[in-house]
Image (cartoon, rainbow, N blue to C red):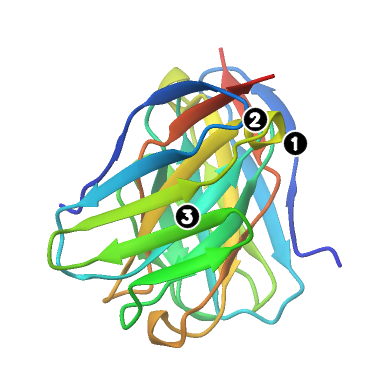
């Protein structure tokens, strides 16, 4: 079972460069998420997609864009990378609704350094 | 703004001790509460999900409780082992928007 797969695992960018983090899930989940994790701050939600064709801002969306390409794939784009975006990025997916006791699955993380 | 707070931030205990990790949340819109484990350099693994209608969940040596009226959840680990060393994160599922809000985590070290 692949679960949630995200690429790349490591990336170093120069300030101002752009890049896209890719994420795919094979569990037929409706909801997908992008989080960032910084030391001592837990995970913070960047963007999420409740279903194919919809995306919504989370807690820290500035400097990012997302695309829900189809039900399987949800990408995160940094248009002009800044040192403040140095972080570990996690993609996740979950089942139908909070009322059904959905479980969430996370990818292994992408370590991004902006110099 | 939803807030999830975890106390303590770090904990070091000798092997065999029973321990309690605390989580508090300020938003009554948190519907379910979930506990995760994160090993260094890895993603998150779900430990226990407590649904709104439940007060606790158990899995092996782990027991998690939820008191929505007081905005608190606790994770109890019995007979701790060095393999339990990891970061433990609690997170609240928001009733609206199907979103998960995380605490900063508790770093646990169990010494052999």
Query: Is there one chain holding both mark 1 and mark 2?
Result: yes
Quarter occupied by the C terminus of chain A: top right
Q: Is residue B100 visible?
A: no
Q: Are marks 2 and 3 in contact (CB under 8 Å)?
A: no
Residue B107 against residue A66 in the figure, above or below: above
Mark 2, secondary structure of its residue = strand
**Mark 2–mark 3 distance (CA, rounded to whole Å):** 23 Å
Q: Tell me residue A23's x, y (percent).
A: 68, 57
Tell me if B22 is positioned left or right of A73 in this view.
left
- Disc 1 element: loop
* Chain of the residue displaying label 1: A
Front in this rendered view, residue B88 or B78: B78
Circle 1 packing at 10 Å, graded few (<14), some (14-19), many (20+), is some
Residue A42 in sight: yes
Instruction: Using the image, tell me which numbered label, if any, was put on residue A9.
Output: 1
Q: Residue at x 70, y 27 (%)?
A: A11
Q: Position of residue A114 (x, y in %)?
A: 56, 19
> Cβ–Cβ below 8 Å for labels 1 and 2?
yes
Which residue in the protein does label 2 denote?
A: A111
Which label number is shown at residue B86? none
Kindly indicate whether the residue at mark 3 contacts the one at mark 1 (C-beta within 8 angstroms). no
Nearest to the eye among marks 1 and 3: give it.
3
Q: Between disc 1 and disc 2, whose residue precedes?
A: 1
Residue at the image position 71 percent from the left and 45 percent from the top = A108
Judge the density around disc 3: few (<14), some (14-19), many (≥20) Cα neighbours within 10 Å.
many
């Amino acid at each position: 079972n692949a679960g949630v797969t995200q690429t790349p695992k490591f990336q170093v960018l120069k300030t101002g460069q752009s890049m896209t983090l890719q994420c795919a899930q094979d569990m037929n989940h409706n909801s997908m998420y992008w989080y960032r994790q910084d030391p001592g701050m837990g995970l913070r939600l960047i963007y999420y997609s409740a279903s194919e064709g919809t995306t919504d801002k989370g807690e820290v969306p500035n400097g990012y864009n997302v695309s829900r390409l189809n039900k399987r794939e949800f990408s995160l784009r940094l248009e002009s990378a800044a040192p403040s975006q140095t972080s570990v990025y996690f993609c996740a997916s979950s089942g139908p609704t909070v009322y059904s006791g959905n479980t969430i699955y996370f990818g292994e993380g992408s370590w991004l350094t902006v110099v | 703004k939803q807030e999830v707070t975890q106390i303590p931030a770090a904990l070091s205990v000798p092997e065999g001790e029973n321990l309690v990790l605390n989580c508090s949340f300020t938003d009554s819109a948190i519907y379910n509460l979930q506990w995760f484990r994160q090993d260094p350099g890895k993603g998150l693994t779900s430990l226990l999900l407590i649904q709104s209608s439940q007060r606790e969940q158990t899995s092996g040596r782990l027991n998690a409780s939820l008191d929505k009226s007081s905005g608190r959840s606790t994770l109890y680990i019995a007979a701790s082992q060095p393999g339990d060393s990891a970061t433990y994160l609690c997170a609240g599922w928001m009733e609206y928007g199907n979103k998960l809000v995380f605490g900063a985590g508790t770093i646990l070290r169990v010494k052999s």
